[in-house]
Image (cartoon, rainbow, N blue to C red):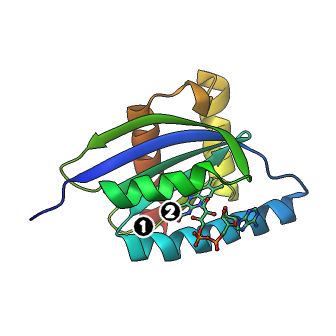
Amino acid sequence: MTETLHRLVYYSRNHISGDAAAFAADIDDILAKSRANNGRDGITGALLFNAGCFAQVLEGPLDTIEAAFERIQQDERHGDVSLLALDPIAGRSFPNWAMGFVGLSDVDSERFAGIGPSSGFDIARLNGDQVHGLLRDLTIEEEKAA
Ligand code: FAD
């Protein structure tokens, strides 16, 4: 039997403190663990960090993305975790990313600097489709640049 793929989208508020180097080290830890677990669990997706907020898309079998989301919600490195969408999907938007990440590079900073002032960009004000579209566009740009 073919399992129906699902997409889960959420955002949360950063609780990691410390300087930029400490923050980058924590992000590296999160990404390493995410990529190992997600590769094992058939999950793909992407994580965005901007202005004190995370936004993440997880795609895969329903049981494994729900289990990952349970773990993620209990993680003290962030809080106020808000589910934006959980829907069946026809195909993956991030087939090549066990967990892509956008948000810390100089290029990402320039992108957000461009988006922010003109639109009042705030992850917390986007809906699930908007977060998914934003992350899909940003990871496509990353793939082209790689
Ligand atoms: P272990 O790595 O053995 O961890 C055991 C416990 O320790 C967990 O409760 C974990 O939350 C906690 N922990 C581990 N390291 C730290 C630390 N440095 N500081 C505080 N607590 C810590 N996990 C995924 O599998 N897939 C994802 O896509 C994913 N995305 C994430 C996105 C964000 C924004 C954050 C903050 C975390 C994300 N995580 C993700 C990590 C997730 O929250 C769990 O930490 C991880 O899944 C636990 O893996 P494990 O069961 O192998 O436990």
Residue 72's x, y, as percent?
58, 54
Give the quarter of the image for residue 23: bottom right
- Residue at (68, 38) in percent of width and height: 113
Task: Describe residue 69's horizontal placement relative to residue 5 as left or right.
Answer: right
Residue 139's x, y, as percent?
45, 56
Q: In the image, ligand 1 is in what quadrant?
A: bottom right
Please tell me the numbered disc located at residue 100: 2
Q: Is residue 119 above or below residue 24?
A: above
Task: Describe residue 116's horizontal placement relative to residue 47 as left or right.
Answer: right
Label 1 residue SS: loop
C-alpha separation, residue under disc 1 versus residue under disc 2: 5 Å
According to the picture, the residue beneath numbered tag 1 turns out to be 97
- Residue at (34, 57) in percent of width and height: 63
Label 2 residue SS: strand
Task: Describe residue 95's horizontal placement relative to residue 50 as left or right.
Answer: left
Residue 13's x, y, as percent?
70, 39
Q: Amino acid at mark 2?
A: Gly
Determine contact: label 1, label 2, CB under 8 Å: yes
Quarter that holds the N terminus: bottom left
- Mark 1 crowd level (few <14, some 14–19, many ≥20, 10 Å Cα): some
Q: Does residue 60 show up?
A: no
Please tell me the numbered disc located at residue 42: none
Q: Amino acid at mark 1?
A: Trp
Q: Does residue 36 show up?
A: yes
